[in-house]
Image: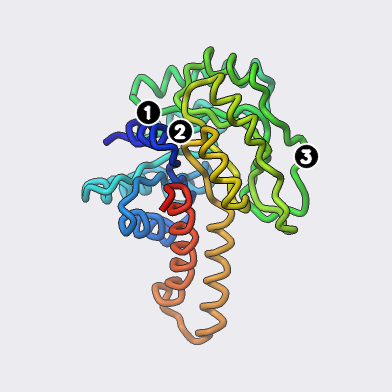
Amino acid sequence: MLLREHIALAVEKKTALGHFNISNLEGFWAVVNVAKNLNLPVIIGVSEGERDFLGIKQIKALVDSVKAEGLPVFLNADHTYSLERIKEVVDAGYDSVIIDEAEKSFEENLRITKEAVAYAKAKEVLVEAELGFIGKSSKLLDEIPEGVSKTTVEEARKFVEETGIDLFAPAVGNVHGMLKSGLEPKLDIELIKQIKEAVRIPLVLHGASGNSDEEIKEAISAGISIIHINTELRVAYRKGLIKSLQDNPDEIAPYKYLRPALKEMESVIEKKLKLFNNL
């Protein structure tokens, strides 16, 4: 099955695909191992910085290697900020790409997104776009980022109709990163329902790290079909690595002292995938 078909099935079943960002090989195997064990489709996300670190073609080759084994693992070029970089990943054969011009004016976002869609759809790559600003960094935050806003239903309808995007990421109270206080902003479940009714394409929830299980369940019921997790994985990796180094101060083999960090990520991914799929 293609990614498009897995998303359509999630819409039908009122479940959500898990989208997990990775920065290294441990992250890759953490996602793949859990998806394989649970027999679930999964999306690996790589932002501009993450794919520059991993290698644009190299991470594609890794994903292709597990696809060849029959695993439904897909690759998304997360948060991409220019047409030049859109073309880079489309030409590399990624499954999907996000054009992120959310900080620009509505008109400029619309114009650039239409150009991205025209280029990507010619090569059958799914295109996602954002409307409304939710911050930019997957990190621990002292406060909600300045300028965070919510998407209006009318703007969502106009944007989706005029751009022809495949997937839509609205701002519905979500923010990138996690607040150090642990008090994440509440998701606007009613707004999700209204936007889903207005646009009638699959919705994507970014910045879901830190939101409660109950909120996530409500968001899926309201119309969310893909959920992004990044910050929680980064926190888990760091926690596992620090403990491993403290417990084994004389260990110098990376594959040994990195394993606990991988396992910490697997624990988060398993919990999230079970939540997203009602398991």
The residue to which callout 1 is attached is 125
Estimate the spatial distance between the alpha carbons at disc 3 and disc 2, rounded to whole Å: 26 Å
What amino acid is found at the position of numbered circle 3 in the picture?
A: Glu
- At label 3, counting other C-alpha atoms closer than 10 Å, the crowd grade (few under 14, some 14-19, many 20 or more) is few
Specify whether 228 is left or right of 126: right
Q: Look at the picture and state if 255 lies above or below 60.
A: below
In the image as oriented, which residue stretches furthest toward the left? Answer: 69
The residue to which callout 3 is attached is 146
Q: Residue at x 32, y 47 (%)?
A: 63
Give the mark, 1 or 3, whose residue is nearer the N terminus. Answer: 1
Q: Secondary structure at mark 2?
A: strand
Rendered image: mark on residue 269: none
> Answer yes or no: do the residues labelled 2 and 1 have beta carbons within 8 Å?
yes
Q: Residue at x 22, y 47 (%)?
A: 70
What amino acid is found at the position of numbered circle 2 in the picture?
A: Val
Percent position of residue 129, x then y: 54, 28
What amino acid is found at the position of numbered circle 1 in the picture?
A: Val
Specify whether 248 is left or right of 12: right
Percent position of residue 228, x then y: 52, 44
Specify whether 17 is left or right of 245: left
47 or 204, which is in the foreground? 204
The residue to which callout 2 is attached is 97
Q: Secondary structure at mark 3?
A: loop
Q: Residue at x 71, y 45 (%)?
A: 185
- At label 2, counting other C-alpha atoms closer than 10 Å, the crowd grade (few under 14, some 14-19, many 20 or more) is many
